[in-house]
């Protein structure tokens, strides 16, 4: 994976205070491609933080 094509953005959770999503954004497409949260890591579902960036 070429790190220069991706940016990690920390997005605060809207549901749980003090919890942050680490969203990986593809700089070429401008879309979120991955997240550190359980929605993504366990179920491959885009979370609200990913949708706020764009999927």
Image (spheres, rainbow, N blue to C red):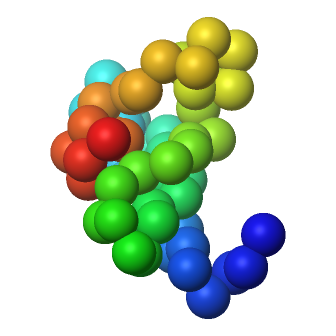
Query: Would residue 10 be visible to someone looking at this image?
Result: no
Tell me: 10 left or right of 42.
Answer: left
Q: In x, y percent, where is residue 5? A: 56, 80
Residue sitting at x 41%, y 75%: 27
Whole-percent x, y for residue 18 in the image? 46, 43
Q: Position of residue 41 (x, y in %)?
A: 69, 26
Q: Where residue 35 sits in the image (x, y, percent)? A: 56, 42
Q: Is residue 50 left or right of residue 25?
A: left
Q: Is residue 13 above or below residue 53?
A: above
Residue 15 visible: yes
Identify the residue at image location x=41%, y=51%.
32
Q: Quadrant of the C terminus?
A: top left
Q: How many marks?
A: 0
Residue at the top extreme, as displayed: 43
Query: For the N terminus, which image quadrant?
Result: bottom right
On screen, residue 35 versus residue 17, left or right, reads right
């Amino acid at each position: 994976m070429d790190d220069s094509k991706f940016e990690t953005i920390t997005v605060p959770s809207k549901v749980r205070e003090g919890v942050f999503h680490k969203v990986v954004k593809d700089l070429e497409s401008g879309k979120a491609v991955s997240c550190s949260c359980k929605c993504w890591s366990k179920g491959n579902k885009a979370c609200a933080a990913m949708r706020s960036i764009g999927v």
